[in-house]
Image: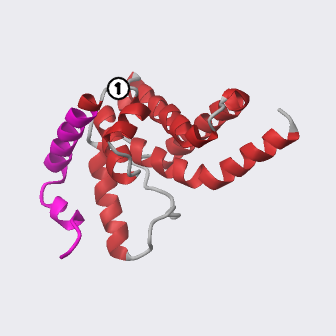
């Protein structure tokens, strides 16, 4: 890669690394695996950098690569084990108020219990702010699949969170 392309990639990486890492954490529920997935997504992006013509689609490209990696890994037998590790003290993009931290922990614990594909849909729709079409594009599926996976994922999340779901709703 030439120097201009390297600089362009480095700028993109610096601007998006925390958001990609946060999304990876929400998808897999483990900071160490999130770092691995985010790194793998950026390595793949670097490898394909010259061939990607539409620079406005970089976020979608990285998101799709990230989601595929997390979902594929969750299908592996050794990944069905539950992690007991707590997240590191750093909280990327999360306020430090105790209520916010408690809410985040409740939500992340709930998301860990939701099947991977449904978790991916919920994270992309509600935490990354994608619409149905954007989520379908990121996952490589139909909009109908996104809608049904959203409904099933919300049902699973409600079943896991129970009364704690009321604590997650904004006041007022």
Nearer the observer, 104 or 78: 104
Residue 79 found in image quarter: top left
Colouring rule applied to residues: secondary structure
Nearer the observer, 120 or 31: 120
Q: Please rate how many residues cluster around mark 1, counting C-alpha atoms within 10 Å: few if below 14, some from 14 to 19, many from 20.
A: few
Q: As displayed, is residue 107 above or below residue 36? A: below
The residue that appears at 23% across and 64% down in the rendered structure is: 168
Nearer the observer, 86 or 157: 157
Q: Residue at the far right: name it.
A: 3
Residue 53 found in image quarter: top right
Q: As displayed, is residue 110 above or below residue 79? A: below
The residue that appears at 80% across and 41% down in the rendered structure is: 6
User: Which region is colored magenta?
Assistant: 146-172
Q: Main secondary structure of the magenta part?
A: helix
Q: Is residue 46 left or right of residue 34?
A: right
Which type of secondary structure does the marked residue at label 1 adopt?
A: loop
Residue 76 found in image quarter: top left
Pinpoint residue 26: horizontal percent, then vertical percent.
41, 48
The residue that appears at 80% across and 46% down in the rendered structure is: 7
Tell me the quarter of the image containing the N terminus: top right
Pinpoint residue 155: horizontal percent, then vertical percent.
15, 43
User: Mark 1 highlights which residue?
Assistant: 141
Pinpoint residue 92: horizontal percent, then vertical percent.
51, 61
- Was residue 168 drawn as part of the magenta stretch in this picture? yes
């Amino acid at each position: 890669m030439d120097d201009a392309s390297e600089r362009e990639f480095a700028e993109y990486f610096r601007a998006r690394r925390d958001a990609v890492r946060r999304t990876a954490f929400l998808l897999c529920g483990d900071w160490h695996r999130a770092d691995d997935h985010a790194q793998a997504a950026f390595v793949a992006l670097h490898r394909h950098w010259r061939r990607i013509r539409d620079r406005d689609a970089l976020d979608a490209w990285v998101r799709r690569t990230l989601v595929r990696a997390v979902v594929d890994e969750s299908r592996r037998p050794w990944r069905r084990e539950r992690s007991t590790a707590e997240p590191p003290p750093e909280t990327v993009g999360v306020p430090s108020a105790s209520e916010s931290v408690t809410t985040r922990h409740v939500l992340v614990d709930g998301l860990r219990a939701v099947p991977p594909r449904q978790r991916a849909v919920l994270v992309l729709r509600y935490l990354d702010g994608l619409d149905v079409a954007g989520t379908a594009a990121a996952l490589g599926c139909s909009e109908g699949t996104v809608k049904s996976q959203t409904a099933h994922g919300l049902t699973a999340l409600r079943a896991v969170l129970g009364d704690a779901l009321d604590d997650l709703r904004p006041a007022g």
